[in-house]
């Protein structure tokens, strides 16, 4: 039997929602692919999935190891030249994979790509988790083409041209095997949230490109896998600080990271204003990071081992404007999103 061209890896924890995901993949996917489901010690729903779709490969983790670890386990056994990390609450559309594969073949330096991600419940609007491609400002705040914080744009074709982006969403993340083998897989200590940004940052530093490929479209039930919760807030705050400590170059560490810590401290002080959970999440994130300095140093060394691109060129891929300032001042004026000088559509 010939090896599949693409390995689609679906981490799964709980819920029958995965049946809709798998059905959409088999109905709407062309070409040579294999489908690997990694069960994270959930509720046994993968058994029904195997009965309905006997072609899938099943892997079982001993417990809930998190999104990053499950994706890595899947990639370790995958046979494809390309990987797709696909959330279990995604439904794909006809031709989605063909578009991504053809684009990757036309761009040999494309290490990661993402499709256009549309809200499942409002199909005229972008989805929170990735929208039309991820960007990041100099202070480390991620945002997207089509989504800034909780504000989602309607999809009117404004981002329909392929373009370089800073990060591709883990909701439906297309990866070149060669690129993953070059820089390493997802950082499992993130558990979930922002591990794909960390991976894309490492890809940039190694000379790979990250692209939005909006000709491919998927629908996402945002929040199904992990609804808005204290744990989600905590992981976002903690992982964002770890992300910056791992990947900022030295000038940014010295000049920008202290400001970012100050902004986190201000979040902690917002408790009297009615956001006690977010304040506690930010505080615990800061405490976790400050209690593990040697672990952070070790992970930083690992993250920089494949560096081939000068720091200044990687830094130019971050937006020089603060998205906090831009959003607060201009969000009602329709001003185009601030984008980095080091990212272009060509």
Image (cartoon, rainbow, N blue to C red):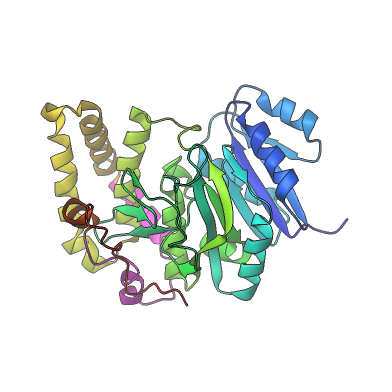
Q: Position of residue 19 (x, y in %)?
A: 68, 32
Instruction: Give the camera-side residue of 120 and 207.
Output: 120
User: The N terminus appears in which quarter of the rendering?
Assistant: bottom right
Q: Could you say where residue 43 lies in the image, as x and y percent from the top left?
A: 61, 21
Residue 294 in the magenta stretch? The answer is yes
From the viewer's side, name the closer residue of 8 and 293: 8
Residue 176 quadrant: bottom right
| Residue that appears at 32% across and 43% down | 150
- Residue situated in front as seen by the camera: 235 or 115: 115
Question: Is 330 situated above or below 71?
Answer: below
Would you identify the image quadrant in which residue 326 lies?
A: bottom left
Q: Where, by quadrant of the figure, is residue 30 drawn?
A: bottom right
> In the displayed structure, would residue 86 be above or below residue 282?
below
Total tally of numbered discs in the picture: 0
Report the magenta residues as a range.
Answer: 293-321
Where is residue 219? Give x, y as percent.
55, 44
- Tell me, yes or no, whether the highlighted magenta stretch contains residue 117: no
Q: Is residue 220 visible?
A: yes
């Amino acid at each position: 039997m010939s090896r599949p061209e693409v390995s689609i890896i679906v981490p799964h924890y709980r819920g029958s929602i995965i049946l809709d995901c798998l059905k959409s993949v088999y109905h709407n996917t062309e070409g040579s692919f294999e489908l690997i489901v990694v069960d994270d010690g959930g509720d046994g729903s993968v058994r029904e999935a195997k009965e309905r779709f006997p072609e899938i490969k099943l892997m079982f983790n001993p417990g809930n190891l998190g999104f990053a670890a499950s994706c890595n386990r899947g990639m370790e056994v995958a046979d494809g030249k390309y990987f797709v990390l696909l959330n279990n609450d995604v439904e794909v559309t006809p031709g989605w994979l063909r578009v991504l594969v053809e684009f990757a073949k036309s761009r040999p330096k494309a290490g990661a790509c993402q499709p256009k991600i549309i809200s499942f419940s409002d199909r005229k609007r972008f989805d929170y988790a990735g929208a039309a491609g991820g960007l990041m400002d100099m202070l480390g705040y991620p945002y997207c083409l089509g989504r800034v914080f909780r504000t989602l744009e309607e999809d009117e074709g404004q981002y329909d041209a392929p373009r370089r982006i800073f990060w591709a969403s883990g909701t439906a993340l297309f990866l070149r095997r060669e690129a993953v083998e070059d820089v390493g897989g997802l950082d499992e200590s993130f558990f979930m949230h922002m591990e794909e940004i960390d991976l894309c940052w490492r890809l940039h530093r190694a000379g790979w490109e990250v692209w939005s490929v909006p000709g491919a479209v998927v629908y996402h039930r945002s929040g199904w896998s992990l609804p808005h919760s204290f744990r989600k807030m905590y992981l976002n705050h903690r992982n964002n600080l770890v992300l910056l400590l791992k990947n900022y170059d030295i000038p940014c560490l010295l000049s920008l990271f202290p400001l970012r810590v100050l902004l986190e401290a201000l979040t902690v002080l917002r408790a009297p204003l009615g956001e006690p959970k977010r304040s506690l999440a930010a505080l615990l994130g800061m405490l976790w990071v400050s209690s593990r300095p040697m672990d952070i140093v070790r992970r930083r060394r690992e993250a920089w081992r494949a560096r081939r691109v000068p720091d200044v060129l990687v830094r130019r891929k971050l937006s020089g404007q603060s998205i906090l300032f831009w959003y607060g001042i201009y969000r009602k004026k329709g001003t185009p999103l601030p984008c980095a000088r080091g990212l272009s559509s060509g």
